[in-house]
Amino acid sequence: MPEGHTLHRIAIDHSKILRGKHVAVSSPQGRFDAAAQLVDGVRLKQIEAYGKHLFYFWANELVGHVHLGLFGRFRVYRGPGPADAATVRMRMMVPKATIDLIGPTDCTIGTVEDRDRIVARLGPDPLRDDADPQKAYDAIVRRAAPIGQLILDQKVISGIGNVYRAEALFVNHINPMRPGNKITPDDFEALWDTIVQMLHRGFAEDRIVTLDRDEFDAPAGLARRGDTTYVYHRDICLRCGSPILTVELGGRSCYYCPVDQPV
């Protein structure tokens, strides 16, 4: 599943193509037909990313909501998209480009109020200027659940996925099984700052790179999973050489070093 920086990058890229234009919206797959007709040919005002959610604001006051989930993805074409588009849930076309959406968890048209209800259920997004980290801290310290589970919960912090969870905890020497109510204000401030820095770097580089290049080499361009991270998808800790362990938290395997992240 894409992490938050990817959605913010998509919002910027799609805005360059669609913002201010009258967009032809259709559903080659057919599952989005009725909703597509509500905004077909309408001018797109803006696109917003919040955590792992995208919102498309149309001039007729309707709002499109997209959540990619595990399998959703966009494809962008110069000019018309391919005629064979049986898997495309939503197609957005302007004269010089086509954006196809395939396999999302959610793709709907609603109102601003619908958007607000979705956002109200989410924790702060570290990539947004309006993020309130105190809200996340309050949600963490009132629970005894493991911190590795809590920061993956989108109701606590929005936009964090499996990679950033493992990497931010490692950098701050926090064991993923530490209870949330044992996280001190200083622990959380350092963890939040790390998450913000990692997400901004991911947005800037359009990929996940958590390694400090002053400490370790990080390959440029395309890289295999684990080549640009400290513990995620690695067998051995880069810093101490200990075997990396995993623990199931929030339905996902969380990677950690038992030496650098002691209980």
Image (cartoon, rainbow, N blue to C red):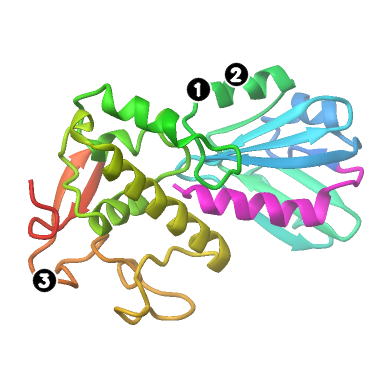
Name the mark on residue 137: none
Q: Are the residues flagged by discs 3 and 2 in contact, CB closer than 8 Å?
A: no
Crowding around mark 3 (Cα neighbors within 10 Å: few <14, some 14 to 19, many 20+) is few
**Residue at point 35% right, 25% down?**
139
Q: Amino acid at mark 3?
A: Cys
Q: Position of residue 86 (x, y in %)?
A: 66, 45
Q: Which residue is mark 3?
A: 240
Name the mark on residue 121: 1
Q: Give the left or right position of residue 148, taking residue 67 as reference.
A: left
Sequence-wise, which precedes: disc 3 or disc 2? 2
Q: Give the left or right position of residue 52, taking residue 144 as reference.
A: right
Q: Please, what secondary structure does the residue beneath circle 2 have?
A: helix
Q: Amino acid at mark 1?
A: Arg
**Residue 2 inside the magenta-drawn segment:** yes
Q: Amino acid at mark 2?
A: Arg
Q: Position of residue 181 (x, y in %)?
A: 21, 28
Q: Is residue 54 above or below residue 34?
A: below
Q: Position of residue 144 (x, y in %)?
A: 19, 25
Q: Which residue is mark 2?
A: 117
Q: Are the residues flagged by discs 2 and 1 in contact, CB closer than 8 Å?
A: yes
Q: Position of residue 53 (x, y in %)?
A: 57, 37
Q: Give the left or right position of residue 251, taking residue 8 as reference.
A: left
- Quarter of the image for the C terminus: give it: top left
Write the start and end of the magenta stretch as one range: 1-23
Q: Are the residues flagged by discs 3 and 1 in contact, CB closer than 8 Å?
A: no
Q: Please, what secondary structure does the residue beneath circle 1 have?
A: loop
